[in-house]
Image (cartoon, coloured by chain):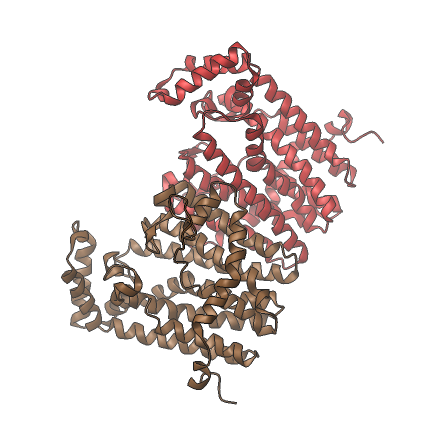
Chain colours: A red, B brown
Amino acid sequence: MPPASTPARRTAVDVTALLERGRTLATPVLRAAVDRLAPPMDTVAAYHFGWIDAAGNPADGDGGKAVRPALAVLSAEVTGAAPEVGIPGAVAVELVHNFSLLHDDLMDGDEQRRHRDTVWKVHGPAQAILVGDALFALANEILLELGTVEAGRATRRLTTATRALIDGQAQDISYEHRDRVSVEECLEMEGNKTGALLAASSSIGAVLGGADDRTADTLEKYGYHLGLAFQAVDDLLGIWGDPESTGKQTWSDLRQRKKSLPVVAALAAGGPASEQLGEILAADAKSSDFETFSEEEFAARAALIEEAGGREWTAEEARRQHTIAIGALDAVHMPDQVRAAFTALADFVVVRKR
Amino acid sequence: MPPASTPARRTAVDVTALLERGRTLATPVLRAAVDRLAPPMDTVAAYHFGWIDAAGNPADGDGGKAVRPALAVLSAEVTGAAPEVGIPGAVAVELVHNFSLLHDDLMDGDEQRRHRDTVWKVHGPAQAILVGDALFALANEILLELGTVEAGRATRRLTTATRALIDGQAQDISYEHRDRVSVEECLEMEGNKTGALLAASSSIGAVLGGADDRTADTLEKYGYHLGLAFQAVDDLLGIWGDPESTGKQTWSDLRQRKKSLPVVAALAAGGPASEQLGEILAADAKSSDFETFSEEEFAARAALIEEAGGREWTAEEARRQHTIAIGALDAVHMPDQVRAAFTALADFVVVRKR
């Protein structure tokens, strides 16, 4: 038997179908869960998920890549259970993810998400807080109403991930007020904001299927490093992504003064480009007309980040985390096609363009 | 054996000592839980709980009446367990209660709580959202890390209560934008905002101690109606409370245009005073100089509410709910002194002056 990561095995998996399966299995249960909310929270949540527009008319919004539900139903299959066993887990991680988006958008003052006005912008800050709270509670409800020992264990792991998510947001906010953030601090923040919930997504179906703690911990290791790879790629796309693919503005993260991995790595690298970048960003931080900067000015900053090595370092970091993620799978017994699917999802995460 | 509600039995219980016991058992664990939060959330939470002042110096703040932790540790004794068995439950309900206070104060724009500036006022809206989220997550963590079947059941009940809490806040917000709110709607909202968490507080220790669902449901019935009695008294104190005792302004709820029970009952009563009150409050709702109204103007509104019967109706409602709460206890076996303590707490709730 060839090792799980051979190219031959990888090409056999249709990632689009895997993502579609997660979405198809989770969405009806997610919609039913959201329908439990008292008005007007049900409507506000439906708007957030892209199921209706701001006027309340049905919409077919961009629900995102849906990596989390795909991982959750896939992880159920680790134990030999049917993917359906992972559905409550898939719904719970989506609910927690969207709870954090609702609150983060408000805290960060972000006005756009998935090409649409954010909830606080359309329905006001109070509804963004309230519906976020409700989705968080609903995540626990969906799991705990299963009434099993496994559901209690799954909820506990999800709670740990949620706490990490909150820690990550706290770090993100505090870093905004600082001149310098180290690469280690940035990685810790991204591990909390992205790694922890992908970790929980990768284990939750298995836990619901009765996996032991060692198996769940190993799957979480896969998901955590997958999350770091995912975020490194996101940070690259946030600067050099094609607006046609990402749906974001050019130099999006630079416009938001984000201290993302390429930036902190470039600043930490030393050398002339790194030092010049440091001076420019320090001046930008004090600039009052930053928002009127031209394309060329952002392009010049991106070029300096690249020259200082921030782009290549981040690309290498994505590959490094991808390797750790796939390597972690070796410690767990699982059906070959499940291993191949986990591997294919990790491959997808690092090559995606959006 | 005399029935549980005889005056003789009631006088045997020292309510102050009961409340103090709950506070003493819960506080060290609550503080240790809050210490788990990453900076600056630990500091912000410590400020909220009154353990430090805005400058970060130790403070001996007013932690509130602490009825919830007292109920939680008492309920553990229903099953014959030690009160200590209820401690994680007491801490969890306090965490959920304070999560809701942090978010509600921000949503409602309230600048003062327990005689101090609210968290969003001192530390900004983002910290109020974030620390609220963290306390909610911590509540689940504290329970689920017990790792028992009972902890899963307790968390599920607490989650149900939290969802009700959120529903109640949604109702409260939506009622603010309406001219009229019925007595039934007001009671439903108060049941969600106050009843549900007192219900969970009254059962959580018992659930952790292994009580069956029927026992837990019955204790929740006691707590729910206790909550409605509590809120009716709160609504009376919100208008006619002595500022010296309550620490609030005179006519506090009237100044905030709160559609509390005495107001909605007075408006629903019909008759000349009721109609006159309706006209005045409708004009107040449109008034731009409402905040400059004199003592006498608020006193005149309070007098109309009383004349229309709103004060007496609410006092009667408090007694009615108190009776239902105590009556619910009859359906559960428990040690005599535990029953007497539950009864004494219910008595305390309706006679308190703050």
Residue A94 seen from this side: no
Say whether residue A330 is left or right of residue B33.
Answer: right
Height in image: A63 above or below A323? below
Height in image: B342 above or below A24? below
At 53% across and 54% down in the image, what residue appears? B139
Where residue B181 appears, x then y in whole percent?
30, 62
Q: Quadrant of the N terminus of chain A?
A: top right
At 50% across and 51% down in the image, what residue appears? B136
Where residue B36 appears, x then y in whole percent?
55, 47
Say whether residue B311 is left or right of residue A6.
Answer: left
Where residue A7 appears, x then y in whole percent?
75, 25
- Depth check, front residue: A61 or A129: A129
Outermost residue on the front side: it is B58
Outermost residue on the right side: it is A1
Height in image: B242 above or below A127? below
- Depth check, front residue: B105 or A342: B105
- Exactly how many numbered labels are in the figure? 0
Say whether residue B63 is left or right of residue A204.
Answer: left
Say whether residue A79 is left or right of residue B189.
Answer: right
Residue A12 seen from this side: yes
Q: Which quadrant holds residue A232?
A: top right
- Depth check, front residue: A149 or A339: A149
